Amino acid sequence: MKQLSALFTLFSLLAIDVSAQKQPDHVVILLLENHSYKELQDSTVAPYINSLLIDPNAALLTQSFALTHPSQPNYIMLFSGANQGIINDNLPTTFPFTAPNLGASLLQKGFTFTGYSETMPSVGYNGATSGSYARKHNPWVNWQGAGTNGIPSTMNQPLTAFPTDYTKLPTMSFVIPNLQNDMHSGTMAAGDTWLKNNLGKYIDWCKANNSLFILTADEDDKTQSNQVMTVIIGQDVNGGSYAQPITHYSVLRTLEDFYGLPYAGKSADSTDILGMWKTTLPIKLADVSAYNKAGKNIVEWMSATEVGAAYFEVQSSSNGNYFSTIAAIAAKGSNGKYSFTDNTTTASTTYYRLKMVDKTGSYTFSKIVTVVSAKGNALSVFPNPASGQLTVRLNATTAGAATLQIIDMLGRIAYQQKVTFTAGTNSISVLVTTLAKGNYTVAIKGQTVQQAQFIKQ
């Protein structure tokens, strides 16, 4: 029995280690339509796609399979780990959905997400079709505006909003061509040319800028056991062919593990895409947060794995773009809690991130956390993320009265109460157990408005 227990422990450690690949700065996922792996591979009418297959930074997954037919449930399963009861291409009769999904999980962890759909007529469009745009290929719209695990309409964008400055891309984005250019109603040649013209520059850029491009298909043409082509391209990818059997759930699981997201649906039962990464990092964070206490900013974090870890750099920025190192803290070598107090900041808003370095010199960055600590009144909230009791701390220069509000991502007031405060440090406890998971803003509205952000877990 002890041997069996030890075996499970060893397997657990190995599973954690291999899933901690280097976190990409940006990921762009493109879905094509209704063509099998064999149709696309070595096809003379898809020369650009086939040129990508031999790129030294491209991994071809030769045993990649879609999950079902027809199109719509495949998109939804890739995005949320389940079909959410959808088994056809018809407009869902009950939406928005509220189940966990990739986009909402990114937002709840402080990352960013946007879906870009070609020829969609307007931001947040919720109609079934418009010209060659088809809603059935846009899974995130099914969660648009939901109170739980919702996707804001501003993140449902036409393709014309896709930035030409790729540093301005969200953490993760999907690109959905219209029916003429995704190989659904148009030709393979047209889709191949469209890909080169619209995303070729990003593909070249991602190979030198710690980012990824993922090309896959929703389903095959019903002739090849639903085998589809999946290609992953990026700076941290070892080029070649890889025979690990994967599905759309495997892709979802890998994306979730990049950013430490909870597993949605059946991605929890899948495995990461392994073996193709140049860097497998030993440090994996469970949490990172920051808050203001007694006029000082405190950064706290907890690691999940530290095998081979060397140290953490605490980095700060006054604008969220240019970071400088303000401290280096040695790793403990095992799962640990850390805290650093920044005694030097004078900015009203300070951004923090961690640079996590292993013993080989490889490194990756945590998400960015923010502290608002304006001179005069200074507002902070902790713990962050919070699941039960949230403490709102206000350092006030004078006594007064105000309204405390908790505002969700859509600008709706989720909680409100009148508060009075004295000159000095004031602490207000708020029970947030009834709030849906997601990002929130705490606002103290009196003669001035003070704000701070927190995540409800």
Image (tube, rainbow, N blue to C red):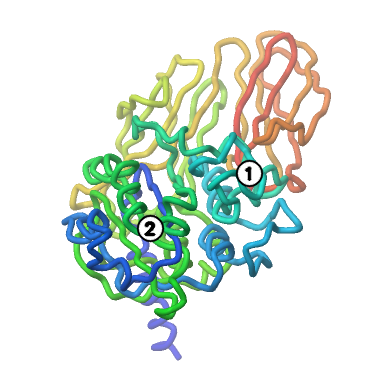
| Residue 334 visible in this rendered orientation of the protein | no
Query: Which three-letter amino acid code belongs to the residue tagged 1?
Result: Gly
Relative to 425, say whether 278 is above or below: below
**Residue appearing at x 44%, y 45% in the figure:** 172
Query: In the shown orientation, is residue 47 left or right of residue 12?
Result: left
From what the image shows, is residue 410 above or below residue 308? above
Residue identifier under label 2: 187
Check the image and name the residue furthest to the bottom: 1
Q: Which residue occupies 44% across, 72% down?
A: 221
Q: Secondary structure at mark 2?
A: loop
Residue 404 in view of the camera: yes
The residue that mark 1 highlights is 438
Observer-side mark, 2 or 1, equals 2
Q: Amino acid at mark 2?
A: Thr
Residue 346 position, x and y percent, is 45, 14
Of 5 and 407, the residue lying toward us: 407
* Pointer 2 local density, CA inside 10 Å: few below 14, some 14–19, many at least 20: some
Question: Quadrant of the rendered structure where residue 224 is?
Answer: bottom left
